[in-house]
Image (tube, rainbow, N blue to C red):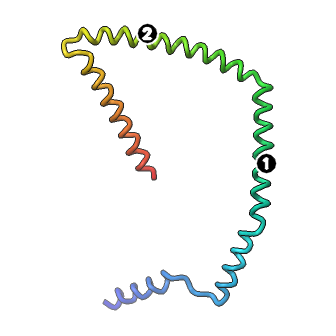
Amino acid sequence: MAELDFEMKLDRMFNEPPAFADAEPFATLVEMRLNRGWNLRQMGIGAAGLVAGLVGVSQLLNSQLLLDVSQVTERQALAFSGGVTGLAKMSANLSALPFGGEAVWLAMALGVMALAFAVTRAVEGFQ
């Protein structure tokens, strides 16, 4: 029993940090240093961000990236229209099934909802 009392007394002693005589002036000094020049820092950070943004835009305009993106967009539009056409053909084939195409669409919708639920739970697990 004596060991348990000793352990509890040690825990109480080391759970709380010791109080220093100059704790109040030290806290005031730290707060003053943190608050000093905050507006100037904000303006400096804003100016640096503006300059960096202008440099980034100029680099983007000087590269051929925008032309490449427009060509990729045209190819993606063609691929998307082909996919929609294939989906329409598949939809016509689904209506010929004995249980109806609505059941397949319902199953796909439930699958998407289950996937969204799983992703939501996974994201909550990381927090």
Position of 60 compared to 77: left or right?
right
Q: Residue at x 32, y 28 (%)?
A: 109
Report which quarter residue 117 is drawn in: top left
Q: Which one is in front, 28 or 119? A: 28
Q: Secondary structure at mark 1?
A: helix
Q: CA distance from mark 2 to mark 1?
A: 49 Å
Q: Is residue 103 above or below residue 55?
A: above
Which amino acid lies under the numbered mark 2 shown in the image of this protein? Thr
- Residue at 36% x, 31% y: name it: 112
Determine the residue positioned at 45% across, 13% down.
83
Left or right: residue 7 versus residue 65 is: left
Residue 115 screen position, x and y as percent: 36, 35
**Whole-percent x and y of residue 89?**
37, 8
Residue named by callout 2: 85
Query: What is the quadrant of residue 99 in the picture?
Result: top left
The total of numbered circles placed on residues is: 2
Q: Is residue 100 above or below residue 27?
A: above
Of labels 2 and 1, earlier in sequence is 1
60 to the left or right of 119: right
Q: Amino acid at mark 1?
A: Ala
In the rendered image, the residue lying farthest to the left is 98
Name the quadrant of the N terminus.
Answer: bottom left
Vertical placement of residue 99 versus 5, above or below? above
| Residue with the mark numbered 1 | 48
Q: Percent from the top left, x then y, of residue 32?
A: 73, 74
Residue 26 tag number: none
Question: In the structure shown, which secondary structural element does the residue marked by tag 2 occupy?
Answer: helix
Image location (x, y in percent) of residue 66: 71, 22
